[in-house]
Amino acid sequence: MSTVRDLVATRRDNAVMDAGAVRAIRRAILTAIAVPGYQVPFGSREMPVARGWGSGGLQVTMALVGSADVVKVIDQGDDEGVNAVNLRRLILRASGATETDDVSESTIVQTRHRIPEAGMVDGQILVLQVPEPEPLRGVERDTRELERMHAEADYAKMWVSLYEDRVRNGMITRTTGYPCVVAGRYVISTTPIPRWDVPALHRAPYLALFGAGRAKRIYAIPPDTTVEPMTFEDVPFEVEFTPGARCRHCGSDDSYLVSTPREEGGETWACSDTSWCRARRHQRGAQ
């Protein structure tokens, strides 16, 4: 944990957030690290981005980033998405950090919807943009009741919801934001990442930080922390998979694939993580 503390403590201020805001968010981050999965309230600020562009994740990144950092920003796995390009430009101009599309070179990865296919390592920080941090919102609307349920670890309604989903559909159909138990205690929403990425959070060597700007919440998964998807003993957790699907660019059948329609009909597949796909093609070409 000393590595995580040092990483957070040594970041510098920047041109987008005032020193008070930076200190407040850093304190919230340290609290979130100390209590994995707990949603820590923080004073969310207005940021120079459009609504829905991930102001929570941006605030976390801006509170951590310094001129010595190397930043990778992705949107749905793509480094060149509109969201990714504009957030990266803002982060770099405000902090003086450098950019990369190589996960292995980065110190901070800010993302929406995906965790990079290439494994991250100890010393790196993954920042996820969170639209809705409350995993129980679909089964309970009362805020005070939600607080009680988390305080008492009363997640019976979530289990009932998963059971009903299984009975109605023959399988648990939840995809993005799949509920997981962190460190055997708190249930979290895994943001808009697909189920494919959920196993990557379990005992990961890196620090994962989740920022929800509109809900004014920050939560964390420290390195080497257990993350267990909520499922039943006789219903194993499964990730998305389409038999026979392969990336049309690199030929991968063991990465998260997205489909696009063909002009002549039918569909074709491609890796969601574009930089990983590009590196795989380059590696295959060099062999």
Image (spheres, grey):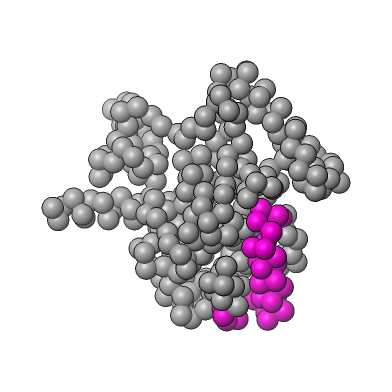
Q: Which region is colored magenta? A: 10-39
On the rendered structure, is 124 left or right of 29? left
Q: Is residue 26 located in the magenta-colored stretch of the structure?
A: yes
**Which image quarter: residue 106?**
bottom left
Looking at the image, which residue is at 48% across and 59% down? 205
Tell which of 201 and 81 is nearer to you. 201
Q: Where in the figure is residue 8, as x and y percent of width and height?
A: 59, 73
Q: Where in the figure is residue 276, as x and y percent of width and height?
A: 33, 53
Quadrant (top left, top right, bottom left, bottom right) of the N terminus: bottom right
On the rendered structure, is 107 left or right of 154? left
Looking at the image, which residue is at 58% across and 28% down? 233
Q: Where in the figure is residue 184, as x and y percent of width and height?
A: 65, 46
Q: Where in the figure is residue 264, as x and y percent of width and height?
A: 28, 27
**Which image quarter: residue 43?**
bottom right
Looking at the image, which residue is at 57% across and 47% down? 227
Looking at the image, which residue is at 58% across and 19% down? 169
On the rendered structure, is 6 left or right of 21? left
Most extreme residue toward the left, as rendered?
287
